[in-house]
Amino acid sequence: MARTPTSRTSTGRSPSSDRPAREGGRGRDRGSDRDRGGDEGELVEKLVSINRVAKVVKGGRRFGFAALVVVGDGKGRVGHGSGKAREVPEAIRKATEQAKRGMIRVPLREGRTLHHDTRGHFGAGKVVLRAAVAGTGIIAGGPMRAVFEALGVHDVVAKSVGTSNPHNMVKATFEALSGISSPRAVANRRGKKVSEILGRREEAREQA
């Protein structure tokens, strides 16, 4: 009785036996991508606002969504970004990627508050940031609170003067944070010791 020939590869296995191995290989690649994304998962992501926008085109209006996201590591690095898309998850993803690309480092005093008071301005948005003693907490509005939580600030007093637009408030807050300098940086810039800079600050505080 003649045997029915079966198709086999050069390795002696049938194509059907090779297919699960290839699929498993692709699955492992995707798993490694997820592991690499886990390193980025250490960042704190805050969704500040989500807004539905409309674009007038021929035949009607086309709706989309605009997202504003703040990203930080809770240790002095923070960034913000905005994204637009037809769906909410895609808009958030675009905003998150932009925020990660534009992160800045802000020096913190004792890892909990700002080194000194500062002001920021962007468009019609004006903000005032003041350092606070331990136990004060975050006293700030919604968009500004998201920035401080992502940054890792635990004690701060902030006030927004002017517009309540979250985009302008966040950008004004970032302008204020970018102007903060640590005593070490000021001492290096002036060619002095850190103790001299801190001594003058204590004298000014006593006179006030």
Image (cartoon, rainbow, N blue to C red):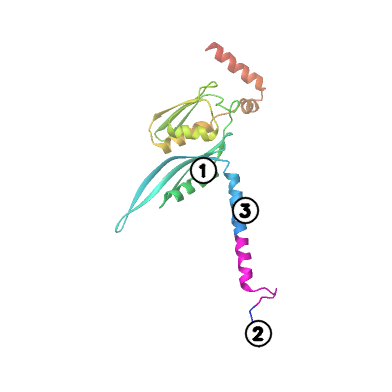
The percent coordinates of residue 94 (x first, y second) are 48, 48
Q: Nearer the viewer, residue 145 or 124?
A: 145
User: Is the residue under label 3 in contact with that under label 2 (CB below 8 Å)?
Assistant: no
The percent coordinates of residue 18 (x first, y second) are 63, 69
The three-letter amino acid code for the residue at tag 2 is Arg
Q: Secondary structure at mark 3?
A: helix
User: Is the residue under label 1 in contact with that under label 3 (CB below 8 Å)?
Assistant: no
Circle 2 residue: 3
Nearer-N-terminus badge (3/1): 3
Q: Quadrant of the N terminus?
A: bottom right
Q: Nearer the viewer, residue 59 or 31?
A: 31
Circle 1 residue: 99
Which residue does the image show at 55% across and 32% down from the upper left? 152
Is 152 within the magenta? no
* Residue interval drawn in magenta: 8-26
Q: Nearer the viewer, mark 2 or mark 1?
A: 2
Circle 3 residue: 32
Name the main secondary structure of what is drawn in magenta: helix
Q: Quadrant of residue 122?
A: top left
* Furthest residue in direction front, as rendered: 1
- Could you tell me how many numbered marks the image carries? 3
Answer left or right for 61 relative to 173: left
The three-letter amino acid code for the residue at tag 3 is Ser
Q: Nearer the viewer, residue 80 or 172?
A: 80
Q: Secondary structure at mark 1?
A: helix
Around disc 2, counting alpha carbons within 10 Å, would you say few (fewer than 14), some (14 to 19), or many (20 or more)? Answer: few
Q: Quadrant of residue 143?
A: top left
Q: Secondary structure at mark 2?
A: loop
Which residue does the image show at 62% across and 53% down from the upper left? 32
Answer left or right for 176 relative to 57: right
